[in-house]
Image (cartoon, grey):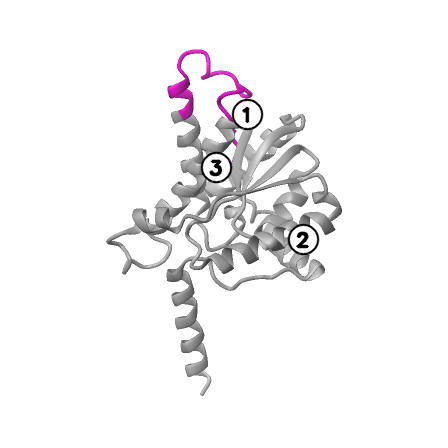
Amino acid sequence: MKEKGWSFYQRFEEQMRRSDQDRLLLHACCCPCSSHCLELLAEHFDITVFFYNPNMDTAEEYEKRFAELVRFTKEAPFASKVHLVEAEYDPESFSAIIKGREMEPERGSRCYDCYHLRLRKTAEYAKDHGFDCFSTTLSISPYKNADWLNEIGVALEQKMREEAGPGSQDSRTEQDVPYFLFSDFKKKNGYKRSIELSEEYGLYRQDYCGCRFSKAERARHVAERDGAGE
């Protein structure tokens, strides 16, 4: 039995084949993760990258990652027509949804809610600004749960269709209800390609997700590795 990720990717490929320069709002967590996603999508979609990441531990990190996106879209030929939207840095939103779960391990329910927060904001912006579809680059990372990301995206689309009422359920390109573009961008060596593009364009490639919890986990792993080598 094939894993869910391949099913999601196959559905994505079908959507991509059907697209006729549909307007896509693509949530991005950072430039390295965006690199291959943009390379893959640029031929089929009119892309606007939506940079919304309230989980970032500092405003400096937020600004640094967005600046790399700006530079990359200017330098990479396939990204030359990509538009960028930098959303407000509001760490209070992240702090509110994870309150009381600060001691939970990484890649658990706290991360699920972080995915949901960022995708919900993306879906709302896509709906309010007339985009045909929305998605996220997060699934390219081997550390992110693509099943969760796709399930959240589908649920957000369905919720918007229910709120829109009768007549919105069957239209893929209903103007006020953007569809969710399935993804598992790590498939077909997508993650490997993102590393290659990072090296080619000299991208700032951070070694943690962005939140203070992933940063602390990374520091622990480094300390353990260095300690084992003594």
Q: Please tell me whether mark 1 sits on a helix, a strand or a loop.
A: loop
Residue under the point 59% across and 48% down: 34
**Residue 166 magenta-highlighted:** yes
Image quadrant assignment for residue 117: top left
Image quadrant assignment for residue 11: top right
Q: Nearer the viewer, residue 127 or 222?
A: 127
User: In the rendering, at what x and y percent does residue 49 appear?
Assistant: 58, 41
**Residue 75 magenta-highlighted:** no
Indicate the amino acid at tag 1. Gly
Mark 2, residues whose alpha carbon is within 10 Å: few (<14), some, or many (≥20)? few
Residue corresponding to mark 3: 122
Mark 3, residues whose alpha carbon is within 10 Å: few (<14), some, or many (≥20)? many
Residue under the point 41% across and 57% down: 211
Which residue is the extreme one toward the right? 77
Say above or below: 110 vs 152. below
Q: CA distance from mark 3 to mark 2?
A: 22 Å
Say above or below: 94 vs 106. above
Considering the whole magenta stretch, tell me its main secondary structure: loop
Which residue is the extreme one toward the bottom? 230
